Amino acid sequence: MRAVRALTLISTSVALMYDELISDLAEYANDPLGFVYWAFTWGEAELINSPGPEPWQVDILSRLGEGLLSIDEAIRLAVKSGHGIGKSALVAWIILWAISTMEDTKGVVTANTENQLKTKTWVEVATWYRRFIGKELFKMTATAMFSTDPEHAATWRIDMVPWSTKNTEAFAGLHNQGKRILVIFDEASAIDDLIWEVTEGALTDKNTQIIWCAFGNPTKNSGRFRDCHDGGKFAKRWNSLTVDSRLVSFTNKGQIKEWVDDYGVDSDFVRIRVRGLFPRVDENSFISLDLAIEATSRPIYPSMDEPIVIGVDVARFGSNNTVLYARQGRNARTLPIKVFNGLSTIEVAQEVVLMMNELGAAIAFIDEGGVGGGVLDNCRHMRIPCQGVHFGGKATNLNLERGVKYKNKRSEMYGAVRDFLKEGAIPLRIRGVEIEFPEELSGPTYSLNEKDQIVLERKEAMARRGIESPDVGDALALTFAYPVSTGRKVQTARVAKNYDPFALERLL
């Protein structure tokens, strides 16, 4: 009997403790800042050196609390920032506050990539969940946080959901009439516009607390995250903030100083990674239109000691062009640029041979993806100096500004073109191509992935925007594929000048 009575007393004590905890949490339903100060043991244990939130975090939590005073419209908060400011911690606090201070809260958390979501965003949530005074009330798994009450596990939860344009159900089904809805976009600049649109269309419940927070580095000067901030199409609907890494107490000031010294305080590198500002490039461009236009009128300086290099972009589809582009040092304007359509791989190879012989070129860099592999094979059979280039291959980080990283070879080559345009010369118009060359070069957009690597927009994505394939730009980019030794000349004795392109077919 004594054991039963003891268990009963313990059970009653635990129940009273839970009731008191729930009552305390309810007091912070409209006070996220107060919740953060109350819910964690600041200045103790793991947080011994942490007195509390940073000023910018206090600002956002205060804005969130002020927005809760009315439920007439959704609360939309957007924060763009430099690196290392503690945004993941703030995401975790908002999630824990939202789920623990209102019964049957529902939410979705996503990020730019599944890897970012699983290894960074959700890991940070788990870290603060472990420190949370009310963690016994909720269970956290690899993909969700939900109430430990079995009757509420399905209705009181926040799910971690990788986004996909082919599967938007998780964002289309955000309804929780009369309760609270939370949506978190982490590294929001790289989340597809379609996910933004689907989410916005779903947040229509009346008399419901709707909270939508978007955080990220300002890696793109276009898209919905850009439109949340000053000058953007939807800026009036969003409460936005910019956070400079230099103003946060725990950021690495030594590393920041190195970046500023190396790149300049107003460079895109520092604007994105430190100042929390969008890049200065044209809205949809990796290469600035102004930069490309400037290169069309720049004088051409003699560079006869430089090797002539040919870039060969081979058309994959009927509407695209095959382009042979010759460049010598800073001169990419006066040497031949040949545009073809509908040629076979053998005919393209013959044109490469002719141009190599005419110019005494050192080497031809040939895009060997798709049908380009056939051109490369034929050129090798004719024993001309050539090298295949995979646009999707690994970047080699050659001839590039120190510290800049690229996702793949095509992105890297376009980076070299952008550097070249600061001193080089290109034509304004190219025969056989309707669009002006600077406009073509400024066509592709870019983003930064989770490893801070530059990723150039794919041709398929450009096509969806109605932008034609930058065939001439790709051919110019190929001339920067790899370094070529100064003074290297084509071995003309090994090149068949009177080559018959159909002889190989007859032999076969």
Image (spheres, grey):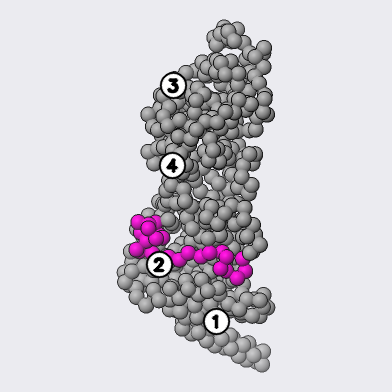
In front: mark 2 or mark 4? Answer: 4
Label 3 near label 2: C-beta < 8 Å? no
Label 1 near label 4: C-beta < 8 Å? no
The structure residue drawn at horizontal position 51% and vertical position 42%, both measured from the top left corner, is 456
The residue where tag 2 is placed is: 239
Residue 24 point in image, percent of width and height: 50, 84
Q: Identity of the amino acid at label 4?
A: Leu
Instruction: Give the alpha-carbon distance from disc 4 to disc 3, as whole Å.
Output: 27 Å
2 or 4: tag closer to the N-terminus: 2
Q: Nearer the viewer, residue 59 or 108?
A: 59
Q: Can residue 256 be spotted in the picture?
A: yes
Q: Identity of the amino acid at label 2?
A: Asn
Magenta segment: 227-251
Q: Is mark 3 on a helix, strand or loop?
A: loop
Instruction: Give the alpha-carbon distance from disc 2 to disc 4, as whole Å.
Output: 31 Å
Q: Identity of the amino acid at label 3?
A: Asn
The residue where tag 3 is placed is: 341
Instruction: Give the alpha-carbon distance from disc 1 to disc 3, as whole Å.
Output: 69 Å
Instruction: Give the alpha-carbon distance from disc 2 to disc 3, as whole Å.
Output: 51 Å
The mark found on residue 38 in the picture is 1
Task: Reply yes or no: does residue 358 show up in magenta.
Answer: no
Residue 149 point in image, percent of width and height: 51, 74
Q: Is residue 187 above or below residue 323?
A: below
Instruction: Give the alpha-carbon distance from disc 1 to disc 2, as whole Å.
Output: 25 Å
Is 102 placed left or right of 85 in the picture?
Answer: left
1 or 2: tag closer to the N-terminus: 1
Q: Nearer the viewer, residue 42 or 147?
A: 42
